[in-house]
Amino acid sequence: AAPAKPEAVELPQEMMLELVQAFCRDTRSDPASAAADKFRNSLITNAGDSSVRLRNSRLGMHSGVCMGKVFKTHPLATLDLQGNVMRDVGAIALIALLRGHETLRNLTLGCNDLGVESAIAFARELSSNNKLLSLDLGNEAAGASMYNNRFNAIAGVAFGHALVTNSSLTHLGLVGVGFGKNQDEQADTESQAAAAIKTALIVNSTLKVLKLGSNGLGTGGCVMALQGLSQNHSLQTLDLSYNGGGPEVGVVAGRALAANTTLTSLSLSHNRIGPGGTSSLAAAMLRNTSLQALDLAACDMRDRGAIALA
């Protein structure tokens, strides 16, 4: 018989009390209310010694600051707070926690109403942090949350620079955070974020998963990321879906795959690659031996592109 799984260890009562109090401040709830009781039960179910997963729990900046304090010496490995409302204040408290923590390796803060301030703070932390393995700040499908993280091209440049020096991160999720826009919300025609990420991909040797879908990178931005991929020897998954790329993306993706020997999954779905770009990609793929999954859904490949891929 298989050995019994060890029972999850609950958080200490004093720690749970502080977290409930912070939740009540965030939600303006009474500690004796049904909302507080529901959150208390969620802590019992979803928070333990090594993992805390409190998605969509209405946690705000008071909870972020509280976690930054109570988890300092807690042997936490994974902290998943997707879909809350930490905002920059709460996020920066968690960055301070990350900086001094001995065991925290995985952090998820997508859809938390984060802005450029916390994005750049995260990038700076990554520049010197060589313990964190996974960071996901990406949003869900468009319109799925009122509190999507909103970054810009400058934040994208900061993350690119951070990946040049970081030597521990294996997973970076940045879906739908706005890297294709400038501070004035206009499209970044210079593709600054993608240019920095291209440089990072050429240099970085530890990152395995990079998710950049739905960032409005356009053809130029996608091309730059794929040019970086052609000289990368560690990445296994790259998501460039929903970025408004054109036929040139397919051509350059083909060149990248012909040169790359590590990538196993590539998503270019919902880009306007067309039959010409798809045909170029298909021809170049004949020289690739590592790719296992290629997503070209809604790429306007038409019959000619589909035949080339067959």
Image: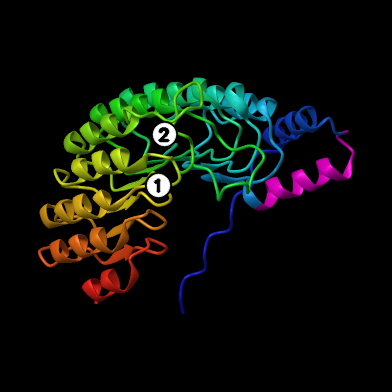
Secondary structure predominantly adopted by residues drawn in magenta = helix
How many numbered marks, from 0 up? 2
Disc ID at residue 8 = none
Q: Looking at the picture, how far across and down is residue 179, in whole percent? A: 42, 33
Q: Is mark 2 on a helix, strand or loop?
A: loop
Q: Which amino acid does label 2 sit on?
A: Gly
Examine the image and state in which quarter residue 83 appears.
Answer: top right
Q: In this view, does 47 lie above or below 188?
A: below
The magenta segment is 30-45
Per the image, the residue denoted by label 2 is 180
Category of crowding for the residue at label 2, using alpha-carbon neighbours closer than 10 angstroms: few (below 14), some (14–19), many (at least 20): many
Residue at 25% x, 76% y is 307
Mark 1 → mark 2, Cα distance in angstroms: 10 Å
User: From where the camera sits, is residue 191 visible?
Assistant: yes
Q: Foreground: 260 or 163?
A: 260
Q: Looking at the picture, how far across and down is residue 166, in whole percent? A: 28, 30
Left or right: residue 109 compared with residue 66: left
Examine the structure image and report whether residue 34 is included in the region drawn in magenta. yes
Examine the structure image and report whether residue 234 is included in the region drawn in magenta. no
State yes or no: discs 1 and 2 in contact (Cβ < 8 Å). Answer: yes
Q: Is mark 1 on a helix, strand or loop?
A: loop
Q: Which amino acid does label 1 sit on?
A: Gly
Residue at 41% x, 25% y is 155
